[in-house]
Amino acid sequence: MPNVLTEASVVTCIHQAPVQLKASQHKLTVDGQAVILQRDLIGALVNNCPNKGPGLVPCATITTIITGVSTELMIDGQPAMLETATGLTNASPPAPVMWQVKSAGQTKLAAK
C-alpha cells in the first residue's frame, strides 16, 4: 500500500519547483505532520517554477488530480492523498504539465 502524504511530503512540478503543502485538518497526523487531503492539493501553490520564457506559462498552482486519491482513508469526508498522486498544473505549453510526489516524507501510515 502507498504511504499517505503529510505536510512533510515533497511534491514538485515536472520542472522541480516545490508545491506548498498546507493541510486543512489536524485531526490525523504522522510524526506531528498533518495528513494532506484532496482539497488541500487543488489550488496548492507552486513556488518559483523555472518554466519561463516567450510563450511559456510557469507552474503556479495545481489544477487537477489524476491519481493517488485514497479510496479508504477519509477525514472530514475528504480522501487522503497518497504517494502515488499525480496531476496537472496551470502551466503551458507545449503539453499538459504534470506534478508528482518526490517523497511521502513518512513511512508509518499507508492506505489504499
Image (spheres, rainbow, N blue to C red):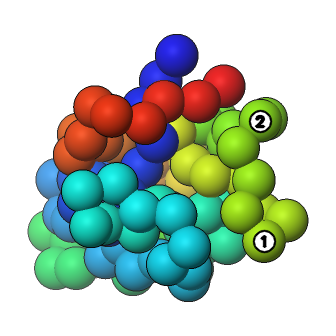
**Toward the viewer: 66 or 79?**
79
From mark 2 to mark 1, how far is it between C-alphas? 13 Å
Q: Is residue 63 visible?
A: no
Q: How many marks?
A: 2
Residue 39 at x, y percent in the picture: 67, 72
Q: Is residue 6 above or below residue 76?
A: above
Q: Amino acid at mark 2?
A: Glu
Which image quadrant for residue 7? bottom left
Q: Which mark is residue 31?
A: none
- Say whether residue 78 is left or right of residue 25: right
Residue sitting nearer the eye, 49 or 32? 32
Give me the residue at 59% from left, 30% from top: 111
Q: Is residue 72 visible?
A: yes
The location of residue 2, given as percent across then percent down, is 47, 24
Residue found 41% across the figure and 62% down from its top: 29
The amino acid type found where label 1 is placed reads Asp
Q: Which residue is mark 1?
A: 76
Residue in the image at 56% along x and 83% along y: 24
The secondary element bearing badge 1 is classed as loop
| Label 2 crowd bin: few (<14), some (14–19), many (20+), radius 10 Å | few
Q: Secondary structure at mark 2?
A: strand
- Give the camera-side residue of 88 and 8: 8
Residue located 42% across and 49% down the image? 5
Mark 2 touches mark 1? (CB < 8 Å): no
Q: Is residue 60 above or below residue 106?
A: below
77, above or below 45, in the image: above
Task: Where is residue 49? Give x, y as percent.
Answer: 21, 71
* Residue 13 lies in quadrant: bottom left
Q: Quadrant of the C terminus?
A: top right
State the residue position of label 2: 72
